[in-house]
Image (cartoon, helix red, strand yellow):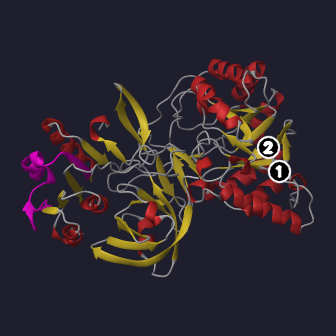
Amino acid sequence: MADLSVKIAGVEFNNPIIAASGTFGFGREYSEFYSLDNLGGISCKGITLKKRDGNPAPRIAETPSGILNAVGLQNPGVDAFIENDLDWLKEQNTVVIANIAGNTPEEYCQMAEKLSETAVDMIEMNISCPNVKSGGVQFGTSCESVGAITSAVRKYCKKPLIVKLSPNVTDIAEIAKSAEANGADAISMINTLTGMRIDINTRRPIIRNNTGGMSGPAVFPVAVRMVWQVANAVNIPIIGMGGISKWEDAVEMLIAGASALQIGTVLFSDPYAPIKINEGINKFLDDNGLKSVSELTGTIKPW
Amino acid sequence: MKYDVKQFELLSNEEIAGGIFDMRLKNDELAPLAKCGQFAHVYVPSKTLRRPISVCDSENGVLRLVYQVKGEGTQLMSQMKSGEMVDVLAPLGKGFKVEKGKRYCLIGGGIGVPPMLYTAKQTENPLVITGFRNKDLIILQEDFKNAGAELVLTTDDGSAGIHGFVTDVLKDKINEVDEVCACGPTPMLKAIADVCKEAGKPCQISLEERMACGIGACLVCAVKVRKDGEEIMQHVCKNGPVFNAEEVVF
């Protein structure tokens, strides 16, 4: 049995598998399958300062080896999260990451300030949501805007700060460097790739928001490439995600440069995927004579 | 633990009308838990999402799913063979609430007919109204008769049964029942809800929406409902698929 624990920005995770924001709610539903301490951590559904209803349905479409979604950040608001969900989450013996999204930099700051006074373990700043009209990805697509919002939120954030990056950019390594230079403790990547499907009979987009964010196995090679590029550009740890659906993908992402992983879309076909992936990583480590999962991080031997 | 995924043995998977298949799946642990109006989330190898299919019947550890081939996923389902093991997450959702001593009118339109069969079996002497586009799409008539239902058949084009819509029949017979349960296309459900409201009869409707997790975590299958005067988003997989028709904002 190898050591699966990892440490990100001083926070200890029992294993490297974290549920990705937006796929796992606040954990209650999946706790009806298995104990949540099987997960290294949970990145909670993205929360905003005020409650949001999200977009009209349909919010999802299947694509070859993936999905498009445009939920539009439906959530009860930061205060309701703290009041109704956080205490329960903290009893689950797993790392709790609050994922925050705002319409303005001030909203991000206010949420970071509120959450810093709670038992949340880490804050993940979502500047990469492609499915809302204002805020979200508009802060995440230039080095200047990423630097400005990271620096602003840093002043209010007393918890380890993860900045979640969008892949819908020209040079993700430069963006990551800007987040690092302005106080990010870790990077999580990648959020979804913007996509679209159209019903050829009605000529209407399948998703009511017209466009959506693409995830699932189809985006995995893009995510691996970007994690590798960012790992070469920054010194802070990377939480890698994007289409991981089996343990081999997890090992590949670690080798590319990730220190921990988030998994999301695969939960919809297999709710037990986190457990199976951890088992697979453990066996791979044992078979290769490795004592700790961290020994894999960034061990790529590029040509 | 409330949810589980199990392997079900596929006993049969036959086409019973054009593009409509009748799948029987055996699992002694999960199948008996299914209640009328709930659904099963079927894993289809090579697809990213499961397919949510309403429970048509559950008896002796056999779950019966009657589904229509609509796209790639259901096409693959239709090719599954007897003896195969099928990965199913079930039962899910909140089904029809049926009470003893009440007479129900159960209405199904097209591929909304199957869940009404299991519901018919849980009620006494129900009035069942089934509507189809034409005679080639008619399903489950014998099953409803065997369940002891008073059965009415309608077709949109008059090729079988009564020429007309299920609501034409409902308007005539609504005073013979205490409550209405329905599943089918949204315009039909809205029309049924209107008839019930006018007659002052309670009405439960089963809704459909594109779905992912099936348990209320991912929030994609949103439906707007009115609770205590406020419009809120609920989810077909967890709060439904059966909703009080008066609360649904169409």
Q: Residue at x 36, y 30 (%)?
A: B227
The answer to whether one can see residue B69 in this image is: no
Residue range in magenta is B154-182
Residues under numbered marks 1 and 2 in contact, where contact means CB atoms less than 8 Å apart = yes
Same-chain check, marks 1 and 2:
yes
Amino acid at pointer 1:
Gly
Left or right position of A125 against A173: left
The answer to whether one can see residue A251 in this image is: yes
Numbered disc 1: what chain?
A
Q: Earlier in the sequence, mark 1 or mark 2?
A: 2
From what the image shows, is residue B117 above or below residue B245?
A: below
Residue A285 location, quadrant = bottom right
State yes or no: residue A32 in magenta: no
In the picture, the disc for residue A257 is 1
Q: Nearer the viewer, residue B18 or B86?
A: B86
Q: Position of residue A209 (x, y in %)?
A: 45, 40
Q: Position of residue A157 (x, y in %)?
A: 76, 23
Q: Residue at x 16, y 66 (%)?
A: B134
Identify residue for label 2: A238
Specify few, some or many for label 1: CA neighbours under 10 Å numbering under 14, 14-19, or 20 or more: many
Q: Position of residue A49 (x, y in %)?
A: 58, 23
Q: Residue at x 82, y 61 (%)?
A: A282
Q: Nearer the viewer, residue A76 or A107?
A: A76
Residue A26 location, quadrant = top right
Left or right position of A88 against A261: left
Local secondary structure at mark 2? strand
Specify few, some or many for label 2: CA neighbours under 10 Å numbering under 14, 14-19, or 20 or more: many
Q: Nearer the viewer, residue B185 or A200?
A: B185
